[in-house]
Image (cartoon, rainbow, N blue to C red):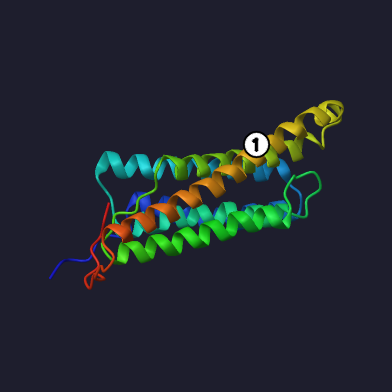
Amino acid sequence: MKSPEKIWNVPNILTLSRLPLAVIIFYLIAIEAWLPCFAVFIVAMLTDALDGWWARKYQQFTAFGRTFDPLTDKVLLGGGFIFLIQVKDSGLYPWSVTIIIVRELLITGIRGYMESFGYSFPADWFGKLKTILQSVVFGIILFLQWLKTLSDWQSIMQYLFPLQGILIALMLLATIGSGIQYVAQAVRLFRQNPDPSPKIEEKPRV
């Protein structure tokens, strides 16, 4: 019998720390405390970078971390975008955030289903680009909302908001495009093996 994996290691603790940080971010958006919100978001992104670095350096990969690392990112970014819909000049609308949430739920479901058959279904460069763009857009929206409160910057905000709109458009294109790519990859794998058998024993994967 295999011994259970150690969940409470440094990478997993860093991963789980993004859940309370996400709650703090949601609250700070609600009260429009933009600079503290931006600072907490930077801390959350640092934990995201640090947990991966630590896991690679000290070989502390776990099935728990592999599942919850992207999940906590989706909770933070998806929830944050929902809170930003009602913020003036955020550039986000219900339809655009719906695209983000539906894509994340759909691909998470497809990935879990495919991996239950033993298929390798890791994030590729397109999916990673999507996550980077979502993080950049989220951070820029928070930063610009803070700049908007400063009288010295109000005269040039009209030039910065179009840049925000361009980045949002690129983010949505990457979100849709990476989602289509994952669906196409799943279809291709099933065509190669149209009658796979689900795996009974779940094995941790790095």
- 143 vs 180: above or below: above
Q: Is residue 154 left or right of residue 36?
A: right
Disc 1 is placed on an element classified as helix
Q: Nearer the viewer, residue 95 or 58?
A: 95
Foreground residue among 28 and 107: 107
Task: Tell me which residue sits at (30%, 66%) in the image.
Answer: 116
Q: Which residue is mark 1?
A: 167
Instruction: Tell me if residue 82 comes above or below residue 89 in the rendering.
Output: below
Dividing the picture into quarters, in which one does residue 173 lie?
Answer: top right
- As drawn, which residue projects farthest toward the bottom? 200
Would you say residue 121 is visible in this rendering? yes
Q: Is residue 26 visible?
A: no
Name the spot of residue 17 as percent of width and height, x first: 48, 54
71 sits left or right of 25 in the view: left
In the picture, residue 191 is in which quadrant?
Answer: bottom left
Measuring from the top left, give residue 30's x and y in whole percent: 74, 56
How many numbered discs sit on the rendered protein?
1
Q: Residue sitting at 35 percent across and 39 percent down?
A: 53
The amino acid type of the residue labelled 1 equals: Leu
- Give x and y (percent) for residue 48: 45, 45
Seen as rendered, the residue at the extreme left is 1
Q: Is residue 74 depicted above or below 163 in this figure?
A: below
Q: Residue 196: image x %, image y %?
A: 25, 67
Q: Is residue 4 above or below residue 28?
A: below
Quadrant location of the N terminus in the rendered image: bottom left
Residue drawn at the location 26% of the way across and 71% of the way down? 198
Q: Left of 155 or right of it: where is 131?
A: left
Q: Tell me if mark 1 has few (under 14), some (14-19) or many (20+) residues whose alpha carbon lies within 10 angstroms of its own.
A: some
